[in-house]
């Protein structure tokens, strides 16, 4: 037996079932059901005025209708017939109504078996005025069944049964399948609350249905199908968004038309409905070329209960500012959806995974990261866990005001694994928290969020207290808990524009506001010329601190010398620096360079006492330099921008970038195309070099560009819709 899916109704043909003539006092009202019209599931107890029906207790499941039976309201009659249908094994619907000509009030209702009548084939109007066949015809379910219940209102206000047909001309549904029938599929209030909770935790429809089946003791007791669950989740999410995701999709399509390098993709579920949306503009994709070594997947909306399920991919640029790598609108938060999103993002970012990725503390996201980025170091956001602490240990924090500060100090300021472990267990013993399940769980995950376990991996953090891993900085001041989808589209553009202006201002400051040197060191002067202004200031802090540090040689062999480095008067707090004299390479136990890409005061102290006067090239990461994004001098860029030249550096840069990306996209398809593209690019580079010498052009102080890392795309195989642009 075929069951009708929720949300789509078949066409029906109405008629006067009992041959009751239409007199002057009544008007027949038919209830056609149009293709695609949303269906409202019948609540068996919706609108019941009284608990009794003609003296019988309402809800007597063994009661069968008969002519003359009375109800206190039309709603009670409808609910009674639906409950009767559930017991017998068929679905119901309203077929026809009659209204009074005098006041328009309904005076007669007809409730029928859902398989009453026959389908009337319809054609959708075509563009030329002719008909167009429906692409996905519904399964035939109408078999002309005559079963029905007709009720009429009396002068007393009660409703009386004027007609009842019991017999059906089709097989009835057994009790264990009756929940599949449309009129008996009802998502109750408690079920909605559970769905909302599980959906908020990132569980998909299949997982939610499994939980509901377990909670209610069987699928038949749940009272609805997985399709109903999906429909409720979709409508709930749309209500939360305050708008239709199609609005965003139309915006993305228009952006693609304006610039073919604009990338977007849409995930469809098995019902061919929109699930998640991802997009990355050309600027975001080029940002990844330069700063994609570490990435943050920002799902702040989850913990802050944002109305908008918006999640950007962000990073850190050469000024230490947040930079965008793409955005996602998450309508479905299952593991499969996150896996799709990460793969799509990776495709837009030329298929090169980051060295490290930061996300919130979430089981579903962790599984997706392991699947898509198996080699990347996955870190949980420390600040997200601190927020969890406030929720999970609220009772403890209210009783012990010092605990939160001690917990924070234990996590953020311990400088070795041994120190952290000792501090952690001291804290656990002090507050008798050995049995706390949440603390046990985050301790098991400690290697993914406690800094001392992560300092051997690059995360582009230049300060212990830097809030870049709080993950919500890029759209601060633009997106908040009340932002709707329609508002977001405009705010998104403003945020991107504002961030670009801040980067241009930082470029200008780097070029035109020279930092004050604090030492006669050649290394400081060198760093001032290489690094951006903000990064130089951080480096300068480390360099100046070396004047208060002592380096004592504790071991010396042919390959490596070991120094113990400590601040004067604080020998109890020392660091070990291993230094290779021949290669001029050093490593420190604090691992600041590995974590941030800047040398620490301890290594700089060793360089000072061993007469290393300038920075070795291996310790200058291009991503922190003023020429991180281009071989051209930024002075020209800033000058052109400030003078508002029509042919500015930015315009030329983007034009050249888009042209180069064409070679990359076509060149990677096969070996022959690759070789042709490489030869063409080399020849172009040679001609540019000649032109620079001839015209006395601006010198390239940074050396190489990153053309080899240019973004490439391929088509997404998506059942709903996808665009891979560029």
Image (cartoon, rainbow, N blue to C red):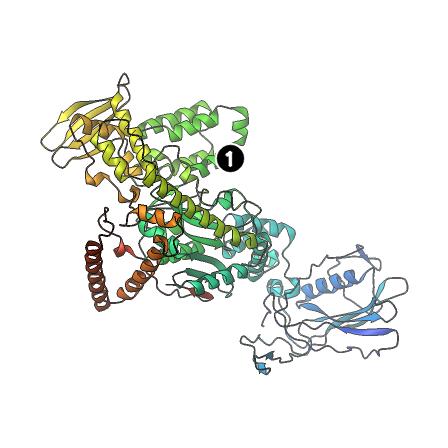
| Image x and y of residue 129, in percent | 60, 82
In the rendered image, the quadrant that contains the C terminus is bottom left
Q: Residue 720: percent from the left, percent from the top?
A: 47, 66
Displayed quadrant of residue 416: top left
- Decide which of 651, 173 is in the foreground and name it: 651
Q: In which quadrant is the N terminus drawn? A: bottom right
Could you say whether the residue bearing mark 1 is in a helix, strand or loop?
helix
Is residue 257 visible in the rendered structure shown here?
Answer: yes
Among the 4 quarters of the image, the one containing residue 538: top left
Residue 107 position (above or below residue 544): below
Q: Residues within 10 Å of mark 1 (few under 14, many from 20)?
A: some
Residue occupying the point 63% across, 61% down: 185
Viewer-closest of 514 and 535: 514
Where is residue 383 drawn, in percent x and y? Answer: 44, 37
Residue ranking furthest to the right: 155
The residue lying toward the viewer, choosing from 482 and 388, is: 482
Is residue 142 placed above or below 251 in the rendered structure?
below
Q: Mark 1 points at which residue?
A: 392
Disc tally is 1
Residue 660's quadrant in the figure?
A: bottom left
**Residue 557 located left or right of residue 85:** left
Give residue 7's position: percent from left, percent from top: 61, 65
Camera-nearest residue between 426 and 655: 655
Q: Is residue 569 left or right of residue 720?
A: left
């Amino acid at each position: 037996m075929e069951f009708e899916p929720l949300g789509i109704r078949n066409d029906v043909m109405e008629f006067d079932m009992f041959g009751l003539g239409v007199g002057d006092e009544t008007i027949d009202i038919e209830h056609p059901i149009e293709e695609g019209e949303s269906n409202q599931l019948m609540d068996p107890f919706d609108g019941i005025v009284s608990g009794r029906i003609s003296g019988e207790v309402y809800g007597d499941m063994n009661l069968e209708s008969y002519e003359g039976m009375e109800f206190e309201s039309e709603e009670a009659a409808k609910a009674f017939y639906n409950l009767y249908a559930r017991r017998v094994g068929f679905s119901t619907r309203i077929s026809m109504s009659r209204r009074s000509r005098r006041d328009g009030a309904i005076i007669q209702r007809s409730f029928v078996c859902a398989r009453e009548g026959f389908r009337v084939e319809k054609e959708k109007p075509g563009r030329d005025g002719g008909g167009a066949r429906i692409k996905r015809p519904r399964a035939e379910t109408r078999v002309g069944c005559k079963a029905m219940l007709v009720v009429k209102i009396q002068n007393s206000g009660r409703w009386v049964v004027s007609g009842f047909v019991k017999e059906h001309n089709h097989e009835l549904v057994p009790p264990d399948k009756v929940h599949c029938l449309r009129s008996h599929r009802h998502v109750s209030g408690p079920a909605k609350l559970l769905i909302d909770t599980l959906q908020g935790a990132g569980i998909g429809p299949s997982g939610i249905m499994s939980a509901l089946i377990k909670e209610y003791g069987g699928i038949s007791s749940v009272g609805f199908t997985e399709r109903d669950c999906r429909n409720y989740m979709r409508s709930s999410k749309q209500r939360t968004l305050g708008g239709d995701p199609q609005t965003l999709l139309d915006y993305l399509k228009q952006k693609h038309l304006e610039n073919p390098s604009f990338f977007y993709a849409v995930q469809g579920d098995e019902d061919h409905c929109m699930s998640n949306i991802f997009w990355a503009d050309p600027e975001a994709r080029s940002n990844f070329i330069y700063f994609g070594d570490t990435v943050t997947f920002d799902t702040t909306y989850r913990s802050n209960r944002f109305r908008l399920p918006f999640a950007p991919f962000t990073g850190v640029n050469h000024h230490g500012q947040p930079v965008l790598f793409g955005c996602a609108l998450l309508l479905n938060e299952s593991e499969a959806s996150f896996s799709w999103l990460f793969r799509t993002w990776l495709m837009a970012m030329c298929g090169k995974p980051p060295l490290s990725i930061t996300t919130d503390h979430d089981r579903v996201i962790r599984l997706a990261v392991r699947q898509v980025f198996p080699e990347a170091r996955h870190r949980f956001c420390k600040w997200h866990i601190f927020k969890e602490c406030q929720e999970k240990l609220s009772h403890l924090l209210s009783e012990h005001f010092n605990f939160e500060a001690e917990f924070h100090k234990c996590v953020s300021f311990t400088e070795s694994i041994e120190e952290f472990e000792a501090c952690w267990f001291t804290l656990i013993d002090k507050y008798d928290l050995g049995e706390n399940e949440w603390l046990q769980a985050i301790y098991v995950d400690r290697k993914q969020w406690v800094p001392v376990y992560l300092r051997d991996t690059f995360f582009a953090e230049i300060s212990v207290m830097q809030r870049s891993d709080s993950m919500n900085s890029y759209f601060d001041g633009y997106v908040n808990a009340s932002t709707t989808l329609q508002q977001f589209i405009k705010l998104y553009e403003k945020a991107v524009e504002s961030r670009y202006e801040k980067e241009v201002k930082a470029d200008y400051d780097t070029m035109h506001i020279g930092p004050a040197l604090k030492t006669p060191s050649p290394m400081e002067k060198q760093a001032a010329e290489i690094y951006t202004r903000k990064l130089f200031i951080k480096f300068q802090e480390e360099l100046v601190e070396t004047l208060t540090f002592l380096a004592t040689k504790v071991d010396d062999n042919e390959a490596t010398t070991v120094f113990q480095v400590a601040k004067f008067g604080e020998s109890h707090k020392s660091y070990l620096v291993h230094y290779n004299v021949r290669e001029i390479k050093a490593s420190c136990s604090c691992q600041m360079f590995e974590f941030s890409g800047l040398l620490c005061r301890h290594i700089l102290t060793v360089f000072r006492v061993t007469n290393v006067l300038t920075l070795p090239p291996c310790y200058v990461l291009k991503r922190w330099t003023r020429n991180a994004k281009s071989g051209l001098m930024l002075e020209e860029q800033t000058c052109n921008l400030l003078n508002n030249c029509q042919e500015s550096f930015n315009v030329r840069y983007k034009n050249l970038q888009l042209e180069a990306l064409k070679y990359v996209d076509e060149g990677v398809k096969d070996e022959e195309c690759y070789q042709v593209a490489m030869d063409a690019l080399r020849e172009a580079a040679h001609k540019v070099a000649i032109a620079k010498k001839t015209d006395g052009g601006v010198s390239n102080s940074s050396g190489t560009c990153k053309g080899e890392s240019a973004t490439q795309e391929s088509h997404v195989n998506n059942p709903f819709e996808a665009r891979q642009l560029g």
